[in-house]
Image: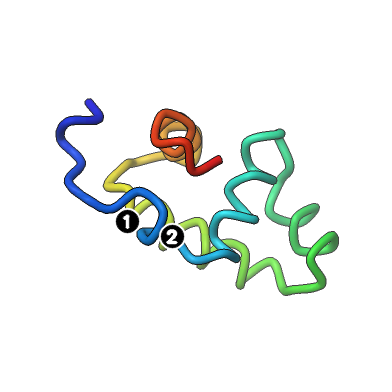
C-alpha cells in the first residue's frame, strides 16, 4: 500500500493539515477540531479533503493510517 505512494513524506502536508490530521487520529470530529483551532467547520472539512487528495486515500481513517506509517503523525 505504502509503495503506491510516491511522495516526500514531510513536505506533502502543510503544518495545519498535519495538525488537523493529528486531531482526526484521536477521534475528534470536524466541529470539535474547528472549535479547538478557532477556524470554521468548513475550513476543517476542506483541510480533510485536501489531506485525502494529497495522500491519495478515500477516508480520513486511511489518511491517518498512511500518515502514521510515513511517520508524519
Q: Locate the C terminus by quadrant.
A: top right
SS for dot 1? helix
Residue shown at 84% from the left, 63% from the top: 35
Query: Where's the N terminus, which quadrant?
Result: top left
Quadrant of the rendered image containing residue 43: bottom right
In the rendering, at what x and y percent does residue 54 appear?
32, 56
- Residue at screen point 79% across, 65% down: 37
**Which label sits on residue 13?**
2
In the displayed structure, would residue 22 be above or below residue 1? below
Earlier in the chain: of badge 2 and badge 1, it is 2
**Crowd band around label 1 with a 10 angstrom C-alpha radius: few (<14), some (14–19), many (20+):** few
Of residues 41 and 12, the one nearer the viewer is 12
At x 63%, y 55%, the residue is 20
Disc number lying in front (2 or 1)? 2
Q: Nearer the viewer, residue 61 or 6?
A: 6
Task: State the image coordinates of residue 38 (x, y, percent, origin top left).
Answer: 82, 72
CA–CA distance in space, label 2 to label 1: 10 Å
Classify 10 Å Cα crowding around label 2: few (below 14), some (14-19), many (20 and above): some
Residue at image mark 1:
53
Q: Residue at x 70, y 34 (%)?
A: 27
Residue 36, position in %: x, y?
84, 60
Q: Is residue 10 left or right of residue 61?
A: left
Q: Is residue 32 left or right of residue 11?
A: right
Q: Secondary structure at mark 2?
A: loop
Count all numbered tags in the image, as a single digit: 2
Res. 10 image quadrant = bottom left
Amino acid at each position: 500500500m505504502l509503495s503506491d505512494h510516491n511522495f516526500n513524506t514531510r513536505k506533502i502536508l502543510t503544518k495545519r493539515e498535519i495538525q488537523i490530521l493529528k486531531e482526526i487520529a484521536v477521534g475528534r470530529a470536524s466541529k470539535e477540531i474547528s472549535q479547538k483551532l478557532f477556524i470554521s467547520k468548513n475550513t476543517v472539512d476542506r483541510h480533510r479533503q485536501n489531506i485525502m487528495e494529497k495522500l491519495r486515500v478515500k477516508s480520513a481513517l486511511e489518511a491517518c493510517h498512511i500518515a502514521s506509517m510515513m511517520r508524519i503523525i
